[in-house]
Each structure stands twice: as structure tokens, then as C-alpha cells.
Image: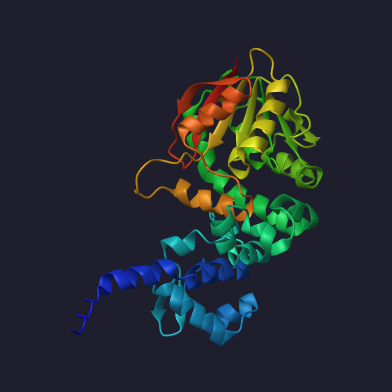
Amino acid sequence: MAMAQPRIHLEAVLRLAELADYIIPFTIRAVCELGVADHLTGGPLPVAELAAATGAHPGALGRALRALACKGIFTEVAPGCYGLTPPAELLRSDHPLSLRAAYPLLPGDVLAWGCFDYSLRTGEPAFEQAHGQSYYDYLAEHPEASARVDRSVQCVNTYLLPSVSRAYNWGGLGTVADVGGGNGAFLAGLLARHKGLRGVLLDLPHVVAGAAAVMAAAGVKDRCEVVAGSFFERVPAGADAYVLKTILHDWDDERACAILRSVRAAMDPASRLLVMEPILPLGDTYDIAKLMDLNSLALAGGPDRDLEQIRDLLSQTGLRLAQVFPTSHALTLFEALPV
């Protein structure tokens, strides 16, 4: 007896095709590399002019913009003539909430994602399979990639800072130490918003190399000490608050605990630790934390955690979870105190 042909669920097919597509994400990142949106601030332009301004091939650029326009990123106002849409506006370098640098096209990351099935088979970072070294060792050897990662984080900070500033009483602190704080963009923004704060920035030498310029641009250089070092070895002592922003989710439990113990050793009895992490919610509703969790797996291997897992890490390292401060951002802020 012949089997009945399954009914084609066209909507499901189209939805899966859209979600499985990496053409659009890569094309967005490529036009960011070229700075296409920067040349449309005065209004729509023909592809030929855009290509000349960006050093692109006219035919190839036209094909890219045509594909992006069908997704609402850029718009074809006349045949071969493109302008900005609200999403494309955010790709302008001069936009106050610009996301252009948030979407770098990094060959190292691309190769890692090409091996993501390795992570699913082993639970280990695909990045190490692709490159034969850890994500952070790779960045140490590729300073331009490291700087671009910092610029990407800096874009996100533009959205994060207002949210965490409203969620917590930063003005009640004296000195804030940002542990693993990258090039200092988050700390600089915090100091600029709260004039009574002083800051200490700790990260690896190649990461903090550009921190002085970041602090100077924010007008806070005189209120911030920059320390080159590893949070696995020693954290500067005596700050009123220590910040770990999206640090723990890059590390497995053993190494996350090592970081927390290092911070705990630096804390005074009255110090507090402020942890900012995406928290995994229950259920199958959309939450960006679930995507960030996979990014951590592919690149560094660490997991995002739920509230109880965060509490458990703290309890293992001489700390207790005191308060939870939800924000309007993807990150949740936790205050932990010494036991």
C-alpha cells in the first residue's frame, strides 16, 4: 500500500529557511565593513555612486543591497537607487546609538562557527577546534581582532549604561573596580554619569593598552587607575565595589570560581560585588540570553547560568547573593556580599 504524501506546511518551510539563512547576517556585517550607511545620510544614492564611495564593485554591491532591502534593511527608492530605513540608520557611524561596530566580520569567529557541530558533540569550544588555541589566547596574538571585539562591546555599552544606572545606586559608592573591563568603555561611561565615583580598570596588558585614550575621551582619565593583569592572579584591593560584567559566562564552573575567589580576596568586609550576566529563563519563550549562551559555547566554552547556578557559584567562593536588580537590558545585575 502506497504511503500518503505528507502535507507540505509552506509557512513552516519558509520560516525554517529564514532562520537557517546566514546570507543576510553576513551581508549586514559586510556592508558595515564598507560603511555603506555612512554615505546615505544626505539621502538615497545610486549604486554606482555608493560603490565609488566605498570601494565596492557596483554589481556586487547592488546585489547585496537588493537582498537587504527585501528584509527592510535599506530601501530601493528607485531602480538601482537605495536609501536608509530605521534599521539601516543604526548602521551609520555617526548615529548616537550606532551599532555599526557591533557587527564585525571576524574571520576567527566565522571559522569557529563553521565547527559548531564539534561543540554539540563534545561540549567544548568550537573555537579551539578551529584554531588550536583558546579564544582569549587567540585575541592576545591578534590585537586588531581584540580591538574590534572591544569596539563591539562598546556599542552594546551605549544601550547598557542607562539601564544599569537606573537599576542601581552607583552614586552611593566611592571606588568601583571593573574586573576584566576590556578597554574601559563601560567604566568610563559609568564615571562620566556619576561624578563622585573613582574607578580602577583591570584587564590583560594588550587589552588595556588603549584604555587611557578611552578614559580621556570620556573626560574621566583623572578619576581612573588602569591596571594590567589577570583576574586569575590578582585583583586590586580596597574598592567599594567590584564589577564582573559578562565575565563568568565565558568560563566553566571551576574557572568561574577561580575568578570569584580572586575578587573575594581583594574585597574589604564592606565591599560588594556587582555581577552582570544574562540569566537563562525557563520555558521556550524567546530570550537573548539563550542565544548568548550558544555564543559562549562556540567561542569560549562557558555557560550562561540561571539564578540558582549563580547563587551556587557565589556560595562556593565566600560570597552570598544579597539582591537581584532586573534591568531593561539583556543583563541582570546581582549584588553579592562577603560571607
Say above or below: 307 vs 294: above
Residue at the image position 54 percent from the left and 61 percent from the top: 92
Instruction: Tell me the quadrant of the picture where the N terminus can be found.
Output: bottom left
Pick the residue in front: 152 or 287.
Answer: 287
Look at the image and tell me whether residue 46 can be seen: no
Residue at the image position 65 percent from the left and 42 percent from the top: 185
Residue sitting farthest toward the front: 1
Residue sitting farthest toward the bottom: 59
Q: In which image quadrant can residue 188 be found? A: top right
Say above or below: 275 vs 185: above
Q: In the drawing, does residue 248 fall left or right of residue 321?
A: right
Say above or below: 111 vs 151: below
How many callouts does the rendering have? 0
Q: Position of residue 218 (x, y in %)?
A: 67, 40
Q: Position of residue 230 (x, y in %)?
A: 77, 37
Q: In the drawing, does residue 81 fall left or right of residue 303?
A: left
Q: Position of residue 293 (x, y in %)?
A: 52, 48
